[in-house]
Structure formats: structure tokens, C-alpha cells
Image: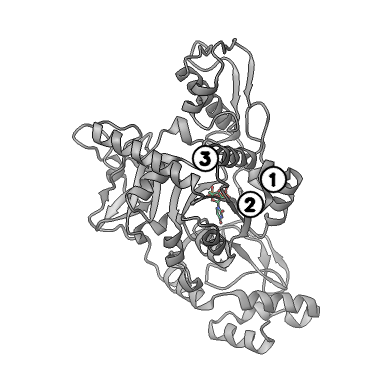
Amino acid sequence: MQSYRAAKDVLRKYDQEHVLAFFEELSSQDQNTLLEQISQIDFEQLDRVIRSQVFSTQGFALPANLQPAAMLPAQPKDEETLRLYQQAKAKGQELIAQGKVAAMVVAGGDGTRLGFAGPKGCLPVTPLKRKPLFAVFAEQVLAASARYGASVPWYVMTSPTNDAATREYFAQKKFFGLEERDVFFFVQGQAPTLSREGKMLLADKNMIATNPDGHGGSLTALRRSGALEDMARRGCEIISYFQVDNPLVHCLDPLFIGLHALKGAEMSAKALPKREPMEKLGNFCLVEGKVHVIEYSDLPEEMARATRPDGKLLFSAGSIAIHTFSRSFVERLTEGGACKLPFHRAIKKVAHVGPTGAKVQPDQPNALKFEMFVFDALPLANNVVILETQRSEEFSPVKNATGDDSIATCLHDQIRRAARWLSSAKVNVPRDADGRPAAAIEISPLYALDEEQLAQKLPKDFAIKAGQEVFLG
Ligand code: UTP
């Protein structure tokens, strides 16, 4: 651990000595906690962030020559693409069967908008069995392992706030049937929370205020935690990345994985055609041949609304945070433990200890939080595949307690997808006057991972009545 003197020297160098203001009042244990925390901070990086994001008044600069990025269609539209997709799917299946693919979920967010007590992955989410988000993903990993005859390890990123609760939950649920050795928890990094003047805030007299360093922090956390080494030991070459809040995601999609591999991509992304020009999704763009995601708030409205000759949006590809990474790419990006992604700043209300030692409860945003975004790795990748997917098939995140992107909308979307899979398996699904399914349907990933598997498995005489609750598991 760092000595008091060494801590003071480094703090003085970076003009952050105020965090030792109450040091003399602390018990020796609390003093050690604070010194330990100071020793963990990368002050050079912090200094760069302060110079570029606190003292500099320059906001986001839109790159010149912004072009829309091309995406591969959800459904092949010609023979050549059809052949490519068949090959890619076979390749993806082969890679999973060879144990070369790992699943990864980022579950370190605070989930402030949802306001659920506990890790978001424990939120009951399925329509009938009320299975939690973690169970939905675990069952997909289990089902894929069984289908392709290989164990698929699952890397679960937590945060210091929810790590213990997440591990306990998995243990309590007996890892949802997965082998414990195939689940690897790793904790994401933290970034100091700053005052608007660029000073570190104290959460307590013995503790610097920090915030999770964003989903982009997952890449350095993979390196720091030994997860990358674990993947190498197991022979995993491709990481299938998803967020904790979207139960419709296909955690291990052979087509997506196969396209990534066949095209020699280092990082890939799934995309949705935006519902309307101003939809709050990041925009896939090309800048000097590199793929960038430009946040919806950074794309000027006239560009967001621009159309092609066929009337479709020019910038139509929206980012939904589903990716594949080559392990070698993550190794390269995190070489030496340093992070190559930029920090983004957000202004938030943060309670803290003021200069007199009293707690300050601000009523206005007072603090700067810095986060990395995983999509900022895209321009650093040598090859990128962007694959369009369908919203109704793969995207319905639970972000809010009510309204858009809430548990209510997600329940409907899960039922609607299940009904669609059944209809395409030639089951007559009862519907109401508005065309909505008139039965509550839940299909466990253990029963079918996709509509093809469902069609193969369903008994010939399978039927549904209006008002029925149907669970296929
Ligand atoms: P969101 O951007 O929706 O943030 O995260 P959030 O923290 O879950 O929710 P709010 O904004 O506080 O309401 C998208 C995904 O990225 C993960 C989240 O767990 C979620 O899966 N994430 C986000 C992290 O793992 N770490 C972070 O620091 C931030």
C-alpha cells in the first residue's frame, strides 16, 4: 500500500490534496482504506480527462465527411448473400461446437431509471414464469451448449456495488443449471467523480466518490480480471457481447458470429433500422473508412432527417449494443492495462462531503461522471461487420419502470415474438381485434432457441385457445 507521504505527493502534483482534508480524524483502518483507494487511481489518465473534458470548453466535434455505414440485411435479398449467410451460419455453429465462442454480459450499470432494488439481472422478466433476466441468458447458454455439444463459458461483468449480490444470486439459483466453473464474474472499473471544477469529490471522509466507468470499461476489466487469460486457456477466440436489460437478445447467434469470422472482423455490431429520424439510438457512421457510432444527441437534425432517393433514412442504422469481439482485438486494445477508449462526461447530482466535513445534498447537478462506451472501440477495429436485425426479434430493453422500454412493453414484446415464432410454425395463434396475441405465451430457450428449432420441436397437433397461458419449456 502507498504511504501517506507518497499519496500526498501524487495528490499535490495533480492538485487534488483536498481529499486528505479529514485524514487526521480517521481511524487507522479508514486511513488505510483511503490510501489504498488513492493508490488505485490512474492520475495521469485523470489529468488527461480533466484537461480535455473539464477545462476545455470544446464540446463534441462532428467529424467532417460523415457517411452512413453499410449494414448487411437481416434477410438475404439475393443469391450471393443467401450463400454467404448459409456459409456464415455453418461457420458460427462450427465455432461454437469447437468451444471457440464465449458469451459475455455487461451487468455493472446502476439501473437508476428502473429503480429496481438489487442487480438488474435479478429482475423477473418473463411473462408467465417470471424468470429473471439472468435466467433467460443462462438458459440460452445452456441450450446452445447442449445443441452444439460444447461448453460455452459465460463472462458476467458486475460492479463493486452489485458484485456480491450477483454472485449470491447465482449461487442461490444453482447457477441456473450451468456449471459453476463455466461462469466467470468480473468487476468493472470505477472512475473518480469530480466537481464541476475538476476536483475529486469525497463520498465520505475516508472515501473518494467514484462511479462505474461505463460499459466501455468492460474491455479493460476483462484484461485486469484475468478473464482474457481464462478465455485463452479455454481456446475461446470470439466474445459474444450483450447487455443485461434485453431478454430478446440472441446471446449466441451463429449467423452473426460466422459473419464476423468469415469477414475477418475484429469487432462487429448488430443494428436496427431506426423507427423515426430522431429515435434515441446511436448512429452507425463512416469516417475516413472507419465505423463510428455517433450519439443521437450529436447528429445534427438535418442529417438525422436526410433521406436517400428511395425515401429511406440516410442514417438509418441504429446501435443496440449487441457485439462480437475477437479476443485478440480486446488483447490489443488493453495491452499494458491502459485503456484506449475516450471518456464521455455526464453532469449528475451527487451527494458528497463538503469542505467543512458536512454532507452536501445538492438540488442541482453538481458533479461530473466519466464513462467509456463500448462502441468507441469500433473505429479502432480493423474490420467491422454491421448486421441488421429485426426489432421484434431481438430488441426490447427494460430501462424504465413505466412507459417506453419498461417491463410492460418488454412483456408484450416477448409474447409477440413467441406468437410470431408459433405462427411461422403454422400454429393458429388467437389474436384480438388489433392483431395482438390473445394468449399469454412463454417459450423457454431450453425448448427452442429460435423459430426454426421451435418448428422442428412442436408436436403436430399443437393448438392454442384464446385466453390460455402457454408455457413451452
Ligand atoms: P445503461 O446505459 O442503460 O445504464 O446500461 P444503466 O446503468 O443500466 O441504467 P441507468 O442509465 O442508470 O438507468 C446499458 C448496459 O450497460 C451496462 C448496464 O448494466 C446495461 O447492461 N453498464 C452500464 C455496465 O455494465 N457498466 C456501466 O458502467 C454502465
Depth order, front residue of 92/450: 92
Q: Residue sitting at 60 percent across and 30 percent down?
A: 444
Say if residue 162 shows up in the picture.
yes
Query: Identity of the amino acid at label 2?
Result: Val
- Residue 295 at least partly seen: no
What element does badge 1 sit on? helix
Determine contact: label 1, label 3, CB under 8 Å. no
User: In front of the other: label 1 or label 3?
Assistant: 3
Colouring chosen for the image of the structure? one colour
- The residue wearing badge 1 is 175
Residue 71 screen position, x and y as percent: 31, 42
Q: Which residue is mark 2?
A: 183
The Cα–Cα distance between marks 1 and 3, rounded to whole angstroms, is 20 Å
Q: Does residue 384 appear left or right of residue 402 in this picture?
A: left
Q: CA distance from mark 2 to mark 3?
A: 18 Å
Instruction: Tell which tag, 2 or 3, sits nearer the viewer.
Output: 3
Q: Position of residue 16 (x, y in %)?
A: 58, 79
Q: Nearer the viewer, residue 41 or 379?
A: 379
Q: Amino acid at mark 1?
A: Phe
Q: Residue at x 37, y 66 (%)?
A: 58
Neighbour class for label 3 at 10 Å: few (<14), some, many (≥20)? some
Which of the marked residues, 2 or 1, is nearer the chain's N terminus?
A: 1
User: Which amino acid type is marked by label 3?
Assistant: Tyr
Residue 438 as seen in the image, left or right of residue 171: left
Check the image and report above or below for 473 versus 26. Answer: above
For residue 148, the mark is 3
Name which quarter of the figure residue 65 lies in.
Answer: bottom left
Cβ–Cβ under 8 Å for marks 2 and 1: yes
